[in-house]
Image (cartoon, helix red, strand yellow):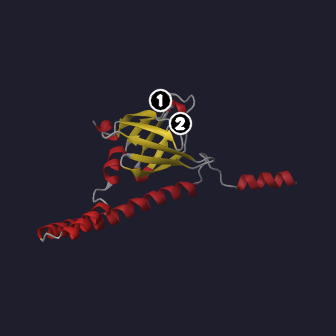
Amino acid sequence: MRSSALFLLLALLPASSNGQSPQERELALLTAQRDKAVEAATAPIHRKYREALEQLLKKAMAASDLDGAIKIREALEKAPDDADPFSDLEAAIEGTKWLWPIEFAGNTPEDIRWISFGPDKEIKHGWHGYTAAWRLVKPNVIELTQAGKVEFVWKMEFDPKFKKATVSKINERKDYPMRIIEQERDKAK
């Protein structure tokens, strides 16, 4: 009786084919969408602030106000940059597919050992159904997080042209090379 009740309970629980529940996947997507919206909303504010500081700096220099110019310059250096660090990176990697290092994928064949970058900072894997999310940690460097039975976190650093990258597990010192294997714009040609 007890084992049949346990079996019935387990059968009624929602199964997750890839280690992530639908709610975990939705949470990752919602977080990525929120981050993108916050960045889009604050970029014009930061840009206007920087422009105003630059104008004020010109006025202080024209008035020979050295102390004021120094303080304004310091504020300008601390002000968020008007360049959106996401725009170049996101545009460059969205729709791309990268060969994942064999060191992290066991004996997975190369034809399915890839990750691809989709919209809303979602990452798909070729060798299993897990999805992951990414976030910018500094220019050209992202952190990939895959939730599931065990949470995996990697750091991926891109070259300036977004054709090569290295990846490493967080808290490890060894970087593994990656290369781009497909771009959506290549498929359109």
Which amino acid, mark 2?
A: Trp
Q: Is residue 138 above or below residue 128?
A: below
In the picture of the structure, the residue carrying the numbered disc 2 is 127
The answer to which of 49 and 149 lies nearer the viewer is 49
Residue 48 visible in this rendered orientation of the protein:
no
Alpha-carbon span between mark 2 and mark 1: 9 Å
Mark number for residue 111?
1
Mark number for residue 84?
none
Q: Tell which circle, 2 or 1, labels the residue nearer the N-terminal end.
A: 1
Residue 22, how many percent across, how many down?
A: 57, 55
Check disc 1 and report its element: helix, strand or loop.
helix
Picture quadrant where residue 1 is located: bottom right
Name the residue located 32 percent from the left edge and 53 percent from the top edge.
87
Check disc 2 and report its element: helix, strand or loop.
loop
Q: Quadrant of the C terminus?
A: top left
Count residues near mark 1 (Cα–Cα under 10 Å), then give few for <14, some for 14-19, many for 20+: few
Residue 104, how many percent across, how many down?
A: 54, 35
Name the residue located 31 percent from the left edge and 41 percent from the top edge.
160
Q: Could you tell whether 112 is left or right of 180 in the image?
A: right
